[in-house]
Image: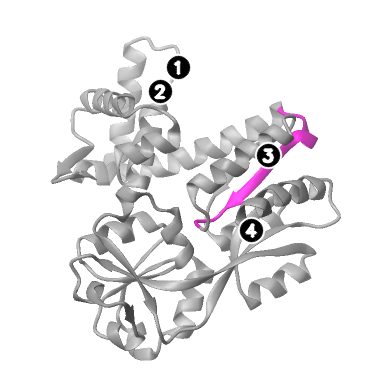
Amino acid sequence: MLFRYNILLKYFKIILLKGKKTLLNIKPFKYIYNVEKYGTIREAADKMFVTQPTISQQIKKLEETLGFPIFEKRGRKIQLTSQGEELYPFIHDLIVSINKLEQNISSIQKDENNNISLGLGPVLPHDLIKKVLVKFNKEYPDKFISIIESGSIELLNLLKNKEIDFAIINTNNDIRVDLSENNIVHNSLFNSNFLLMTSSNHILAKKETVSFKDIKNESLMLYKNGIVQKSLLQLLNSENKQNIFLSFVEYTSIINLVRDNMGVSIVPASLKKTLSKEEKKGISFLNFHDFGKSIEVSYIYKDNEKKASDAKAFLLVLDSYIK
């Protein structure tokens, strides 16, 4: 923590000495955050709607200012350096706070009735969400949508606390009881089976389908989302549970480690649809032939409130693409 604090002070000092009008140019930190989040500069550029050279140049300038590299190439991959790994947790917290601040400012600037906040878990393809947003904007040009990405449990809590208007999350029986008790409307969109994700070089990748018995000696890496992990733990026997050695708050790290054959992972089938061709390189998805259960992806919103009509309007647009 002391290292990160000193580095930040150094950056502030350089900015002030150069006579910048703003205390901090936040863009390079946003680029670093998104490159680490999505795994490649190309993917980060696509998500942020900027060019790859823009991201590369901004990060390079920041590295020159700080005096050390943040990223380094290892083969075809780009990864954090040891200094970057030390600094990244602070950058993560900074960007999350900035995003929340920007959302609050947007909420103040926009008319309350026209500002809609959507909580989005890692359950829908990026292209699908983009299409839905474009169509919704055409049909309701006076509505402003802000998107908050997080896990299902976190999004449900935000909805209950009225910090977001509606959300698309994974649900199970326990969650549906919680929704009913809190007067939250629940619309099932689709069910998603679980798949085994392995490296394309893994021996299991040659199989057409797999059994849970096939992974009894494999190292398991799971997503730390409460609903997904709870569902998996209920399905895995005690022998398999002992193999869980890593738990993550996002899928990017799991995908990268699986690609490197560091272990295997059990993921919702819906995740496969969210990945680009580049992200799917080097990994394989296999169906389980002895597991019939699935998780449910649902659209939820508070009933009897002003935003209920907005939620229903958005659901109609989304539902037209899902079906």
Q: Which residue is mark 3?
A: 136
Q: Secondary structure at mark 1?
A: loop
Residue 209 placement: quadrant: bottom left
Q: Which residue is mark 1?
A: 22
Identify whether 322 is placed above or below 289: above
Residue 6 in sight here: yes
Residue 165 in sight here: no
Q: Residue furthest top?
A: 19
At 28% across and 85% down in the image, what residue appears? 214
Q: Residue furthest right?
A: 304
Amino acid type, residue under disc 2 in the picture? Asn
Amino acid type, residue under disc 4 in the picture? Lys
Crowding at dot 1, Cα within 10 Å, few <14 / some 14-19 / many 20+, comes out as few
User: How far from the left and from the top, in percent, is residue 199?
Assistant: 24, 65
In three-dimensional space, the C-alpha distance between marks 4 and 1, rounded to whole angstroms, equals 48 Å
User: How far from the left and from the top, in percent, is residue 293?
Assistant: 52, 81
- Earlier sequence position, callout 4 versus callout 1: 1
Q: Which residue is mark 4?
A: 323
Amino acid type, residue under disc 3 in the picture? Phe
- Report the number of discs: 4
Q: Which residue is mark 2?
A: 25
61 left or right, relative to 298: left
* Tag 2–tag 1 contact (CB < 8 Å): yes
Q: Secondary structure at mark 3?
A: helix
